[in-house]
Image: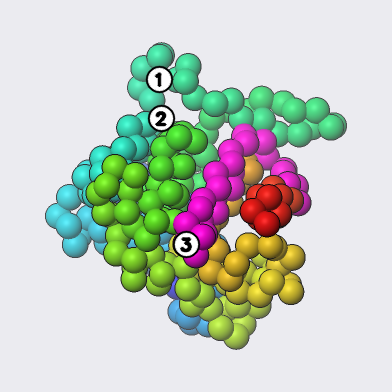
Amino acid sequence: MGAGLDYDINAEGIKKALNEGKRTTREIVGALSETVLGFEPGTRFRYSLCHDVLGALVEIWSGKKFGEYLKENIFEPVGMENTFFGMPRTEEGMERMAARYRYEDGKPVRTELLCPYNIPDHANITTDYESGGAGLISCTEDYALFLDAMACGGMAKSGKRILSPNTVELMGTNHLTGKALEDFYAKRSGYGYGLGVRTHIDKAKSGSLSPLGEFGWDGAAGAFAMVDPINKISFTYFQHVMGWDKRIQTEMRNALYASLD
């Protein structure tokens, strides 16, 4: 998230690519090169389409579609049977999707199941694009299995290893300094940013009872993921309500650690 990119999926380069019939992950990510960077890479932090770019790079390095690579190397070894790209194509599949809400005048109102950060959903078109940042559909059980593997140093409950302990450690290590770290503190005080995850670096500023090195992420509608590789525990919480209060997550996390004493 320090590359200087943004999350403007209405960028002229992307719209031009879609109008020209470009539909694959690599084609659409390639169109991002037409966008002028917002800052010198490495100097600031800005939430962006960086993970989408990484998905395209995985395709280049592996010679496989991003989804195929993830299925072979993460989903199947971990036992994630209900994780995939794109909305379900059957009525039965749609019936299993959790509803999503937003608050209006203090009341929850059900909203359409579209992701504003996923290019195909936003453009309301069918593509072969697999978004590394916002494209996967999953469930609580699958995500819990993945987080458990991270908490156990990359070893899944199935007994299959998906990452080395050294890679998991690097993933949860803060890589921000200077102004970039200040940018992230504005979003989550006491936390830095590792490889795609927030990571705990200052208890005095975070107010968290979790140990330093605890890492994870938050979802736009309130999903919360936490990995503690020191105590080998993980915590998974999902809600589907826009406009959530961050205190919910902080209080749940602290309640978990208070119960361990």
Region in magenta: 223-248
For the point 47% across and 62% down, the residue is 229
- The residue indicated by pointer 2 is 87
Q: Farthest residue to the right: give it.
A: 105
Residues at circles 1 and 2 in contact by the CB criterion of under 8 Å: yes
| Image coordinates for residue 98, horizontal then vertical, percent | 54, 26
How far is mark 3 from mark 2, CA to CA?
A: 32 Å
- Picture layout, residue 95 above or below residue 194: above
Task: Name which quarter of the figure residue 76 lies in.
Answer: top left
* Visible residue check, residue 91: yes
Q: Dot 1, crowdedness within 10 Å: few (<14), some or many (≥20)?
A: few
For the point 47% across and 20% down, the residue is 96
Total of numbered circles in the picture?
3
For the point 51% across and 47% down, the residue is 117
- The residue indicated by pointer 1 is 93
| Image coordinates for residue 78, horizontal then vertical, percent | 31, 43
| Image coordinates for residue 8, horizontal then vertical, percent | 52, 56
Task: Describe residue 95's horizontal placement relative to residue 62 as left or right.
Answer: right
Identify the mark nearer the N-term, 3 or 2.
2
Question: Which marked residue is nearer to the observer: mark 3 or mark 1?
Answer: 3
- The residue indicated by pointer 3 is 229
